[in-house]
Image (cartoon, rainbow, N blue to C red):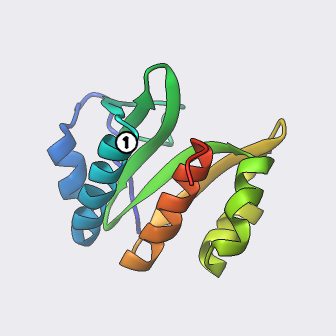
Amino acid sequence: MYERLLDKTISPTFDDLIAYSGCTKNLWIELDKYITETFSAQKQIRFPYGNKYGWSCKYSLKSKHICDIFAENGAFTLHFRMSTVQIDSVYEELSEYAKDVCDNKYACSGGGWLEYRVLTQSHMGDAKKLLAAKLNLK
């Protein structure tokens, strides 16, 4: 379940990534619009971090990495780094699901990497809150 596109030799388009996410494709389209319009982000399809991660769409603001979104069969997962200060700024406003993601982050130097899987519309609000906090927007 939630298999990723792991074949490095087949370079997908953005539409391919969206289609692979299945029943969550409209959520990804909504999040894509939010990230590109709110943050004026640029997109790049890439195969980062090694063979187990698969194909993603990287969102960045100039040279600042916002997040990668990995296409999964029936879902998609945001992968991004946040400082403890950024997480703490929105933690109390988050759902239990999002708090659990923050509590189980891959810790690194004053913060950590979050893997936030989006399955439902209820996950979208927290995804947007976390990304806004990452970029210090309220």
Compared with residue 68, is residue 132 higher up or lower down, i.e. above or below? below
Confirm whether residue 50 shows in the render: no
Compared with residue 29, is residue 62 higher up or lower down, i.e. above or below? above
Quarter of the N terminus within the rendering: bottom left
Residue 134 place in picture, x, y as percent: 60, 45
The one nearer the camera, 127 or 117, is 127
Q: As drawn, is 14 to the left or to the right of 43?
A: left
Confirm whether residue 82 shows in the render: yes
Residue 42 place in picture, x, y as percent: 33, 30
Q: As drawn, is 41 to the left or to the right of 26?
A: right
Compared with residue 90, is residue 123 higher up or lower down, i.e. above or below? below
Q: As drawn, is 78 to the left or to the right of 98?
A: left
Q: As drawn, is 72 to the left or to the right of 65?
A: left
Residue at the spot of label 1: 6
Quarter of the C terminus within the rendering: bottom right
Q: Residue at x 79, y 49 (%)?
A: 84
Task: Identify residue type, mark 1.
Answer: Leu
The one nearer the camera, 99 or 106, is 99
Q: Residue at x 78, y 49 (%)?
A: 85
The one nearer the camera, 70 or 2, is 70
Q: Residue at x 37, y 42 (%)?
A: 6
Callout 1: few (<14), some (14-19), or many (20+) C-alpha neighbours within 10 Å?
some
Which residue is the extreme one toward the right?
110
Q: Dot 1: what SS?
A: loop
Residue 133 place in picture, x, y as percent: 61, 51
Query: Quarter of the image holding residue 90?
Result: bottom right
Count of marks, rendered view: 1
Residue 50 place in picture, x, y as percent: 52, 31
Which residue is the extreme one toward the front?
138
Compared with residue 8, is residue 80 higher up or lower down, i.e. above or below? below
Q: Residue at x 29, y 65 (%)?
A: 27
